[in-house]
Image (cartoon, rainbow, N blue to C red):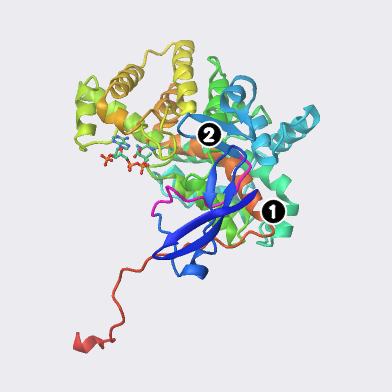
Amino acid sequence: MDEPNGSIRLGSENFDLPVILGTEGERALDTRTLRAKSGFITYDEGYGNTGSCQSSITFINGEEGILRHRGYSIEDLAAGSSFVETAYLVIYGELPGKERLHGFTEAIRSKAAVHASMNHHFEGFPIGAHPMAVLSSMLNSLGAYYPQMTTNNREQDLAHLDETAALLISKVRTIAAMTYRMQKGLPFVFPLEKEYTEEFLHMMFSKPHIEYVDECGAAKALDLFLMLHADHEQNCSTSTVRMVASGGANLFASVSAGVSALWGPSHGGANMAVIQMLEEIHASGDDGTRFIEAAKNREARLMGFGHRVYKNYDPRARILGKSAESVLDRIGIDDPLLDIAKRLERAALEDEFFISRNLYPNVDFYSGIILKAIGIPVEMFTVMFAIGRMPGWIANWKEIAENTKSRIHRPRQIYTGHTLRDYVPVEKR
Ligand code: ACO
């Protein structure tokens, strides 16, 4: 959908550039030919105003707080869909009919077990290794067991995509559970071909002789958490997946890079940071007031608040905020951290500092409270995010791989280092 009606003035010269229109009315000036025509590149450190691709997976309107996957609102999906169905939608573009959903569910269900020799990889990690380091390494290692899916030949890797997608969505959960058990010194538990989140909870918490029983709807709460993380357009980790994919790398290598990108506290690591922040506030006896002041004085960051794209309430935070209350009610936990979170939210939403900067709760603000309530340890929180984001990474890899015109991603830079200087041998330095 191109409209050749853009132009840019540099000095005394005008350069005509096409405008690209999205289906929701977003507009971009297509600067791909600007350097060739003018010698200028565009500069946008942090890519706050740069479209890196055209994509039909997810639409976000940050000003209005809208999130849709393939045209379906996140609120409708949260009310009626499941993680596995949403994963199918995100990857394949349409809601599956009964048969397709059954086939996809079965493919995921049947692929939960990992090759027995992968246990040796786990033994190689020290106790205390960060679960995100383990997950990233293990996803890449997993690819080594499937040479037919890791050819780095687009056509061949795409020919196996259905199998690879189901396998990754399934096994990421097994690797996560195995990581947790390794850290605890517990024996691994074999999957039993249960529903997606039930299987995960079983692999996490069953004992060799006693099967985990979900008495409080933990599987349902986890399903909602995962679904709300399924995709979020060109965030840091998804852009990383696309970047790696653009060089022709296979899906395992690309999602492994995505996990590394997700790890940071400004991105997926924020869900851990939120709970740590709430615990510190609680331990210090603060009701949140002192912390808000510290955030305003830039001595602290209110984790779980603010977003590069949302300048309004993150719709996922709204859904998770409500869910956190009902999960805690069902489990019968009275978590003081939820009260602190609610107080922080109220205080921030009424404070000029946060209002003027459009800082609202993001997806991570309440998600940790839910994960904590269902027994997931804090150090596994970002891994839970990665399990949820797997469909989005797969869908974005697929979009790159299927686009025969896609080029390797290779941004330019403005060089600010030394100009040419003479080499000085070491004895003269
Ligand atoms: N607490 C206090 N002040 C904040 C916060 C916050 N959480 N977030 C932004 N600000 C302030 C900044 O200090 C800055 O103020 P200034 O203009 O007076 O200097 C202004 O708001 C803009 O902030 P930036 O950091 O420039 O915004 P950016 O878009 O680069 O960052 C980010 C977005 C990284 C999410 C940021 O809001 C943040 O660090 N939030 C806390 C971490 C977090 O929750 N991350 C999860 C994001 S969602 C996700 O990835 C799943």
Q: Which residue is mark 2?
A: 229
Q: Is residue 285 magenta?
A: no
Mark 1 touches mark 2? (CB < 8 Å): no
Hey, what amino acid is under mark 1? Glu
Which residue is more in the foreground, 320 or 197?
Answer: 320
Per the image, is 49 magenta?
Answer: yes
Say few, some or many: other residues with alpha carbon within 10 Å of mark 1 (under 14 / 14 to 19 / 20 or more). few
- Secondary-structure class at tag 2: loop
Position of residue 182 relative to residue 330, above or below, is below
User: In terms of sequence position, does the residue under pointer 1 or pointer 2 come before the other?
Assistant: 2
Is residue 271 among what the camera can see? yes
Q: Answer left or right for 164 relative to 328.
A: right
The x, y position of residue 278, in whole percent, is 30, 26
**Magenta highlight: main SS:** loop
Query: Is ligand 1 less than 8 Å from the beta carbon at label 1?
Result: no
The magenta region covers 45-57
Percent position (x, y) of residue 253?
Answer: 57, 55
Q: Determine which residue is flagged by label 1.
A: 402
Q: How many marks?
A: 2
Depth check, front residue: 43 or 29: 29
Judged from the image, the quadrant occupied by ligand 1 is top left
